[in-house]
Amino acid sequence: MSAPQKISIFGATGSIGQSTLDLVGATPDAFKVIALTAQKNVTKLADAAIQTGAQYAVIADSSQYETLNNLLVGTKTTVLCGKEGLLEVAQIEVDTVISAVVGLAGLEMTYAAIPYCRKLALANKESIVAAGEQILALATEHSTKIVPVDSEHSAIFQVFEEQNRAQLNKLILTASGGPFRCLASAEFANITVEKALKHPNWDMGAKITIDCATLANKGLELIEAALLFNVPEHQIDVIVHPESIIHSLVAYQDGSTLAQLGMPDMRTAISYALGWPYRHKTLVKPLNLIEMGKLTFEAPDLTRFPALRLARQALKNCQGQRIIFNTANEIAVENFLNHRLSFIEIPKIIEMMLEKTTPPKLNCVADVIDFDRYLRHHTQQIIQQFQF
Ligand code: NDP
């Protein structure tokens, strides 16, 4: 029997983190959990640490340290907190890091972990969007394999033939279209947080669920695909496929288009990233195409969903614009979730920030983090001042 795979899960209490823990729990002998991290959810983090026997549990919010410590008294888990704790566990050697923090908050620890892991299972798309150049360069330097967790990128990863790169025609990302795919534009002003949080196919964290509703998520994924697979913007299409069965496609110049299909269940993509280069059995319902009956496709509507257009524009421009797209979106979504901004104002804020901000020269991840900090503050100010 081979040695268990040593893993650390960043964002263990979130939707991806919990699905990862489910998979780990199903084959406990295959994994040894080294570190689990969360922002503030001490109860879920302590439960996960007890269940897996994790060596470290790290809570980013230092005010929760005592509570977590008390919950883990009598266990062998070492409790750490704050940015120092996150960076400390990022620098422990493991086979696989599952990077599943939401937002650019995941960048620093993901970047710090790259020299210390053999494989980075990357769900935290915001990091690649903002600092793809730096992350990919470091991964190459340390021979760390990046395996995407996002279902679309996992699909492309599975069918992309590196040896036929010169014969690539297009990457085709599929999008469910979200809950407002068929909603008339006149109704967009009445979209509530509750309605936007109801995704038709996927059960996910709040931020990505709103991103799916605005199609900003597809914009982030467009950028992620361009960087991860080193393919120019004009060679990446987005099509709406409401059933979310085809997770993405790669079209070659000989007329062949290869796709990866499966039920809309993130456990398939997570399991693939955990197991790569091998596949493991999961409890995901097998795909039954006869039961499905038909699969449908349509073009995305960039008028009702301008965030996708803005992401394409940012991708065509420069790294600084991609950071603006990401950070302005994060802050706008946060304000929408707190009922301080309406749904249609989310892309307006992104557009305004893209127009108003001149990005600085960005040489390293520290520059990205500084620029993101500036943008967070500035976007929040604009939201407070702006009268729509
Ligand atoms: P969730 O909101 O469900 O979970 C986010 C996780 O990150 C939680 O563990 C949270 O801790 C932690 N976290 C949040 N803020 C911080 C911070 N400042 N410092 C450290 N940790 C923090 O997100 P998802 O699981 O839905 O998404 C995670 C990532 O995966 C995102 O980038 C998303 O785009 C991507 N993704 C998600 C998919 C999904 O199906 N959910 C599909 C494809 C990609 P706490 O619980 O304590 O707040």
Image (cartoon, grey):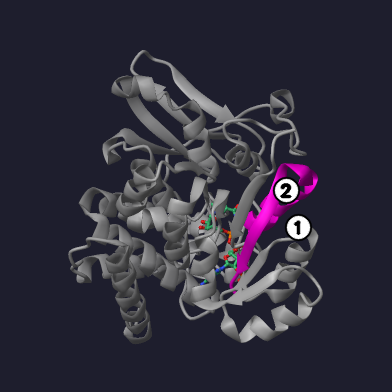
Q: Determine whether 272 is above or below 44 in the image.
A: above
- Residue at 61% in and 66% down: 37
- The image quadrant where one finds the N terminus is top right
| Relative image position of residue 251 (x, y in whole percent) | 40, 24
Is residue 17 in the magenta section?
Answer: yes
User: 258 left or right of 53?
Assistant: left
Q: Amino acid at mark 2?
A: Val
- Residue at 77% in and 50% down: 25
Quick one: 25 or 161, which is closer to the camera?
Answer: 25
Label 2 sits on a secondary structure element that is: helix
Residue 248 visible from this viewpoint = no
Q: Determine whether 127 is above or below 189 in the image.
A: above
| Relative image position of residue 315 (x, y in whole percent) | 28, 50
| Relative image position of residue 99 (x, y in whole percent) | 53, 55
Q: In which quadrant of this rendering is ligand 1 seen?
A: bottom right
Q: Amino acid at mark 1?
A: Thr
The residue beneath circle 2 is 24
Does the beta carbon of the residue at mark 2 sit less than 8 Å from ligand 1?
A: no
Is residue 49 in the magenta section?
Answer: no
Label 1 sits on a secondary structure element that is: helix
Quadrant for residue 161, please give it.
Answer: top left
- Residue at 43% in and 48% down: 221
Does the beta carbon of the residue at mark 1 sit less than 8 Å from ligand 1?
A: no
- Name the dominant secondary structure of the magenta segment: helix
- Tell me the tag on residue 52: 1
Quick one: 140 or 168, which is closer to the camera?
Answer: 140
Range drawn in magenta: 15-39
User: 235 left or right of 181?
Assistant: left
Cα–Cα gap, marks 1 and 2: 8 Å
Residue 108 visible from this viewpoint = yes
| Relative image position of residue 350 (x, y in whole percent) | 34, 66
